[in-house]
Image: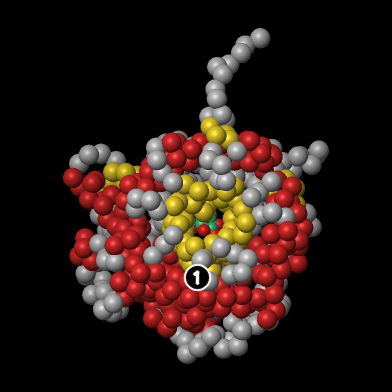
Amino acid sequence: THAGPVTAPLTFPTGFLWGSATAAYQIEGAAAEGGRTPSIWDTYSHTPGRVVDGDTGDVAVDHYHRFRDDVALMARLGLTSYRFSVSWSRITPQVTADGLGPVNPEGLAFYSDLVDALLAAGITPAVTLYHWDLPQALEDAGGWTSRATAERFAEYAGVVAAALGDRVRLFITLNEPWCTAYLGYASGVHAPGRTEDAAALAAVHHLNLAHGLGAAAIRAAVPDARISISLNLVWVRPETDSPLDADAARRVDGLQNRVFLDPLLRGRYPADVLADTAGVTDWGFVRPGDLQLVAAGGVDVLGVNYYSPTVVRHWTRERPKEYADGHGDGAASPWIACEDVEFPFRPGRKTDMGWGIDPRGMTELLVRMAREAPGLDLLVTENGAAFPDVVGPDGRVADPDRREYLRTHIAAVHAAITAGAPVVGYCVWSLLDNFEWAWGYGKRFGIVHVDYTTQERTVKDSALFYADVIRANAVQP
Ligand code: PNW
């Protein structure tokens, strides 16, 4: 028989966190229960034409009622960590731009019970305070274009931290502010669906400010809390070594990476981004002291979400622009001041989202962060892939593509650690198939399959694979 080469498993540091991630609106359902009021995603998903097939998060995967079973499932898989988000409008259902209003004990109780269930199962909770579900009343008063939203966010973050801080150590302020700002306010493919470039840049700043103010509020409530933010950093490369392609890559890096990293790590906005966008806004919403405040809030653990690689080139205007990143082929693009930037179609395998697959981006981004923020702990707060899958007659869900995606990306995390990046954990997106935002339930990211008629959960092969990785604290190269 043929004996393949013997390869040693890639072993992770002791205590490495193995988690999965979810977000409130994508899994909870119970949209009108427990005193919850609407968020921008309720409004958006109930607006005809916004979400594929008119799907909404009204019921989602009913996690609100099934959380104990879902925690039991996590325990079965051996997860040592779980990243979930809190629905702001469950906690302060009457918030307005002027104040939080009363705190809803039923809202806090849900998350408190969830935390207790996790701890009883030996699973370390990581709490995201904002995963895109802004209370609608705040959007009505300007949403993230308004400074008041950042101020109310900080107060809300302080309330949640005070309630859970005796049991939760890690608080992630914001999930992917890039998506909130540009997809929500420039391209409009996410809630609230606005398409104004200047509004998106105001949102960028108020999100950065929200992180800074929120970090201070969390630290005041829970002095030994560890603060994080999850950024969907882009691994962007120019197609050729021409100066014009390099400039395209610089712009995309500025808008997606440095406009969030520089305030956080250096207390300033990148000069090139300010210059590139000068025709859109004068950045007059940045007040003296804001950037110092963001840097002072700082970060103890940087959350990195990585899914796919990005290649750009200068657009020569000879033919219609290509948007292989999926953004901008509709009416509006999230790429502000990027009229000359093209995202060329690339050969190779794609996930069901149409996203390219290249684990090297994971290694490169983690190593870059280790270089630019020496000593800062890194946590992969999301990584995963959508593939269509089928429950076989024997009840098995064979998902070899997702399994291979996870194996190669976990190996890429190991490569980053070997190169010196202080990565403390990895969270697969996602535990369960769920409401994939504008795509609705048609795209499945879960390592656990959900039958949307019966809400039955079925562990996929990728979950069994992940359980093996966790048990061994190692992955096969
Ligand atoms: C992230 N894009 O979203 C989110 O944090 C998750 O809630 C989401 O389900 C997951 O990744 C999969 O999409 C993104 O268009 C959504 O570039 C869209 C983009 C990036 C991330």
Task: Say left or right for 446 vs 420.
Answer: right
Q: Is residue 299 above or below residue 58?
A: above
Residue at horizontal 29 percent and vertical 66 percent from the top: 267
Task: Say left or right for 11 vs 416.
Answer: right
Residue 142 visible here:
no
Disc 1 residue type? Answer: Pro
Q: Is residue 189 above or below residue 221?
A: above
Task: Say left or right for 148 vs 162.
Answer: left
SS class, disc 1:
loop
Q: Residue furthest right?
A: 394
Q: Is residue 183 above or below residue 355?
A: below
Residue 221: % across, % down = 52, 75
Q: Residue furthest front?
A: 224
Name the quadrant of the N terminus: top right
Residue at horizontal 18 percent and vertical 45 percent from the top: 243
Residue 95 visible here:
yes
Counting the numbered discs, the total is 1
Residue 375: % across, % down = 38, 51
Circle 1 residue: 223
Task: Say left or right for 381 vs 448.
Answer: left
